[in-house]
Image (cartoon, grey):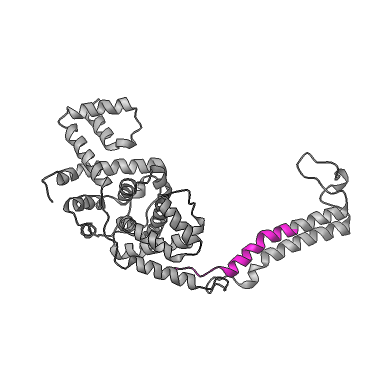
Amino acid sequence: MSDSDRHVVLSVRSGDRDAFAELVHRYQGRLFGLVLMMVRQPAGAEEVTQDAFVRAYTHLGAYDDRRPFYPWLATIAVRLSQNWLRQHGLALNREGTSLDQLHEPAVPPAPLADLIADERSRALWRAVAALPSGERTAVILYYRDELGVREIAGALGVTSGTIKALLFRARRHLRERAVAVALAPGETK
Amino acid sequence: MNCSHVLGLIDAGPFADYPREHRDAARRHALSCPTCGPALLATETIDTGLAALPQPAAPRDLAANVMARIARIDELPIAGPAPAVARPSSLRWYPALAAVGAGTALAVGVLVSGVSPIDVQSLGFARTSTGLVVMPATIAGAMGVAGGLALYALGLFLPVAVREDFRPADDH
């Protein structure tokens, strides 16, 4: 946990509620992006992101401040996203690597990519958004949010081996879909 | 080392449980192979791109909405009864009453029958059993133990009942 995060958490714990706004501002984009990748609906993602921050605030007493703050917050968001998917009839199967067997709505990934300004990043975001649910969640948590394999496994409630398998398959899918071509210098989608 | 094996290693990347020499050999193969070379380049490009993947802009009102919800939570009376937590109040005391009843019944039973479920005659204060507990040598002592057990059970269950009384309303 960065000293800055720890300082804010201690302030909130000692009664300075407004200090929590600093954590919200610091992590809202990152958390919203993660949740958006999981639920794939901007309105649902906003609802779940709000819930995650509120839950973090009300459970701040249970947070171990020797550990980084964001992985703890991300774990809350992942669990709430899973609940949201379940409530909307889109439950994840947590057995083995069948985490990917999600019956997802026919929501094209393009609207998510439209929230990204840069064209090359948008192409990659589209490709990631098109991955099966488990793979894209693992990719976001591992590459963008820099969580370790064990932390991701804990957040998703599966084994480390499952996460490695998901990341392996995600890399293969991305390669096979020739994302690299779209990302190559001089190429635009 | 054939192309299929090398492509598998390229996709597995840091998640492959292979010795470094093995991975280095795969990389050397890829650099000189027309099939594996582009795959290696593509995967490295993807890795770099993923690490730098930007985040979408969060909704403009998200932070304000979160802080407004938190403010509403803090305005709830801390010691007030939860409006929608629904165990009937009489039920909250059942575990504690049952514990007190059991303790009392045990103590009275020992007094009336003169027979203790604990073999108090064979155990004395000065003697430690093969376990770790020093047992009382008198009926009164046994009653004390029984009463203590009842109080212990009370201590276990009473906080649960009290906490339910003061649980704040769930935010959701």
Q: Residue B145 in the image: x percent, y percent?
A: 80, 54
Q: Main secondary structure of the magenta part?
A: helix
Q: Residue furthest left?
A: A186
Is residue B103 shown to the viewer in this render? yes
Q: Residue B23 in the image: x percent, y percent?
A: 29, 29
Is residue B115 shown left or right of residue B17? right
Is residue A59 shown to the viewer in this render? no
Count of marks overlaid on the render? 0
Determine the residue positioned at 45% across, 55% down.
Answer: A7
Please tell me in which quadrant of the rendered image residue B151 appears. Answer: bottom right
Q: Residue B70 in the image: x percent, y percent?
A: 43, 68
Residue in the foreground of this view, choosing between A83 and A106: A83
Determine the residue positioned at 37% across, 46% down.
Answer: A147
- Quadrant housing the N terminus of chain B: top left
Please tell me in which quadrant of the rendered image residue A31 appears. Answer: bottom left
Task: Please determine whether, in this image, residue A179 is positioned above or below residue B89.
Answer: above
- Quadrant housing the C terminus of chain B: bottom left
Please give the range of residues in magenta: B150-172
Q: Residue B167 in the image: x percent, y percent?
A: 55, 68
Is residue B114 shown left or right of residue A85? right
Is residue B139 shown left or right of residue A131? right
Residue in the foreground of this view, choosing between A75 and A174: A75
Residue in the foreground of this view, choosing between A62 and A10: A10
Determine the residue positioned at 77% across, 45% down.
Answer: B133
Q: Is residue B89 magenta?
A: no
